[in-house]
DNA sequence: TCTGGGGTCCTAGGACCC
DNA sequence: TCTGGGGTCCTAGGACCC
């Protein structure tokens, strides 16, 4: 079994840097202290990606831009461009698909590749080097490539030394390459687990690997068994070629540029989120039976509530009605910073149960949604928006990747 | 000029049924 | 009037990933 993990180095930053160079920008962002960061005025001012020179100042992903600038006053901040990132991600995926039919897009900047399913015209070691070289030469950015016999080891391998490196991490290399690393570098050891492990005096992956599993399951339950296996390089998961059909939930959320204090404003934000999440649901040919609304207050307190519907829905109107009901039951009147909506218990839309809703009304509503989806797909998301958003100061579709500000169109719905 | 947005999985507790 | 345990469903919250 030969599995590759391919990881774009400082993906958002590299991709923005390449794009800027192509546009004639004189400086390569990768070579100066720079970050990709959100808009502080929109209250999204965090570091999404950093250059290697920025990293030397101690800037970490997730820092606020204010923190980043206090570490490095000369920092260059680049706005994210998600459409560009999706294009770059697609290009990487396409190139990797030449090496195997089984490529899993793990995230926007990472793929797994099952080379055992490939044609094997190259030895795996040669293939790894060739992938790395071709991405750099043909796509203009660098990747780290990890090779092993399972996904976990391939991924840990690709993260060993960056950038532009190819590493193997086969079982006989675990002791030498994996075990000396700090335990928090192991996949699935996050902040909370790290703290508890340190309290148990477990500080390296090797120490974790050699701790009796029973001791770990006492503290961490099933998660303890998982990280113990990972520390020993054990992982039986398969590379699954990307298909949205397998997705379990879909959600959209947004931080609002101001604190929302009135229910009426909150409803508009909710509606704009419902519009987008419902479009995404329908584009997956799915329906959802559970609707969940989450809030984050101006004090950063988070809470959420969910509701199981009598039957699955995909209509914007039904989803919004459910979300509104949940919001009314949920909201404790505090100023709201962030609102989210999530849909789960997804089922394919090719069959669904009959409900108490009038089938004729339903059909009419679904036809309307379908029409709106088609128009937006053809003429742009904002070719058709609800009139209630006009002059509201709230964008008619929200959540996910908001590409700058669109001019307000005035079609009625 | 303070703190994003997209997901998955697990656990615990309460309601409810038999 | 007092007492049971098992199983399932639903929900809230937290941990993790990118």
Image (cartoon, coloured by chain):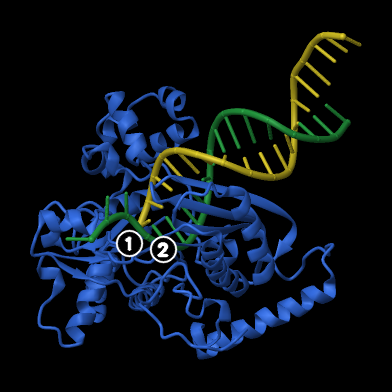
Chain colours: A blue, B green, C yellow
Estimate how packed mark 2 is, as few (under 14), some (14 to 19) or many (20 or more) residues with alpha carbons within 10 Å: some
Task: Locate the C terminus of chain A and report the quarter of the image it occupies.
Answer: bottom right
Residue with the mark numbered 2: A256
**Residue shown at 23% from the left, 81% from the top:** A19
User: Residue A350 — which label?
Assistant: none
Estimate how packed mark 1 is, as few (under 14), some (14 to 19) or many (20 or more) residues with alpha carbons within 10 Å: few
Residue with the mark numbered 1: A43
**Residue shown at 53% from the left, 46% from the top:** A332
Q: Nearer the viewer, residue A228 or A188?
A: A188
- Residue A355, position as x, y percentages in the image: 83, 63
Residue A81: image quadrant is bottom left
**Residue shown at 41% from the left, 22% from the top:** A215
Callout 1 secondary element: loop
Q: Are marks 2 and 1 on the same chain?
A: yes
**Residue shown at 65% from the left, 64% from the top:** A319
Please indicate whether residue A69 sits to the left or right of residue A213 in the image: left
Earlier residue among tags 2 and 1: 1
Q: Is residue A137 visible?
A: no
Seen in the picture, residue A25 relative to A234 is either above or below; the reply is below
Q: Are marks 2 and 1 in contact (CB under 8 Å)?
A: yes
- Residue A320, position as x, y percentages in the image: 63, 65
Q: Nearer the viewer, residue A320 or A63?
A: A320
Label 1: chain letter: A
Please indicate whether residue A157 sits to the left or right of residue A152 in the image: left
Please indicate whether residue A355 sits to the left or right of residue A135 in the image: right
User: Between marks 2 and 1, how big is the CA–CA gap?
Assistant: 7 Å
- Residue C17, position as x, y percentages in the image: 37, 51
Q: Is residue A6 visible?
A: yes
Label 2: chain letter: A
- Residue A76, position as x, y percentages in the image: 14, 68
């Amino acid at each position: 079994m030969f599995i590759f993990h391919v990881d774009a180095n400082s993906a958002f930053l590299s991709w923005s840097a390449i794009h800027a160079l192509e546009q004639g920008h004189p400086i390569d962002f990768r070579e100066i202290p720079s970050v990709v960061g959100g808009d502080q005025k929109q209250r999204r001012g965090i570091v999404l990606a950093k250059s290697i020179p920025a990293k030397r100042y101690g800037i970490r992903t997730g820092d606020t831009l204010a923190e980043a600038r206090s570490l490095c006053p000369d920092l260059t901040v680049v706005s994210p461009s998600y459409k560009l990132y999706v294009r770059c991600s697609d290009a990487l995926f396409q190139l990797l698909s030449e090496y195997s039919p089984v490529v899993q897009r793990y995230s926007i900047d990472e793929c797994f590749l099952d080379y055992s399913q490939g044609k094997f015209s190259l030895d795996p070691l040669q293939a790894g080097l060739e992938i790395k070289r071709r991405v750099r030469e043909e796509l203009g950015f660098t990747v780290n490539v990890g090779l092993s016999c399972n996904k976990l080891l391939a991924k840990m391998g690709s993260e060993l030394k960056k950038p532009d490196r190819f590493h193997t991490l086969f079982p006989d290399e675990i002791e030498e390459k994996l075990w000396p690393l700090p335990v928090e570098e192991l996949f699935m050891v996050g902040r909370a687990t790290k703290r508890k492990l340190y309290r148990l005096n477990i500080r390296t992956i090797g120490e974790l690997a050699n701790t009796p599993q029973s001791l770990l399951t006492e503290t961490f339950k099933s998660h303890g068994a998982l990280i113990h296996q990972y520390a020993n390089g054990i992982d039986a998961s398969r590379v699954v070629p990307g298909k949205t059909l397998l997705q379990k939930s879909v959600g959209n959320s947004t931080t609002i540029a101001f604190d929302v204090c009135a229910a009426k404003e909150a409803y508009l934000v909710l509606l704009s989120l419902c519009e987008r999440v419902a479009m995404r649901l329908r584009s997956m040919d799915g329906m959802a039976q559970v609707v969940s609304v989450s809030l984050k207050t101006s004090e950063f307190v988070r809470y959420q509530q969910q509701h199981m519907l009598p039957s699955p829905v995909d209509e914007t109107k039904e989803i919004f009605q459910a979300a509104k009901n949940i919001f009314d039951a949920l909201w404790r009147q505090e100023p709201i910073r962030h609102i989210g909506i999530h849909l789960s218990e997804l089922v394919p839309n090719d069959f669904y149960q009959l409900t108490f809703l009038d089938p004729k009304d339903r059909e009419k509503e679904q036809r309307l949604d379908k029409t709106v989806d088609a128009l937006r797909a053809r003429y742009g998301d904002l070719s058709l928006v609800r009139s209630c958003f006009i002059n509201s100061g709230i964008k008619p579709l929200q959540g996910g990747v908001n590409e700058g500000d669109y001019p307000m169109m005035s079609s009625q719905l």
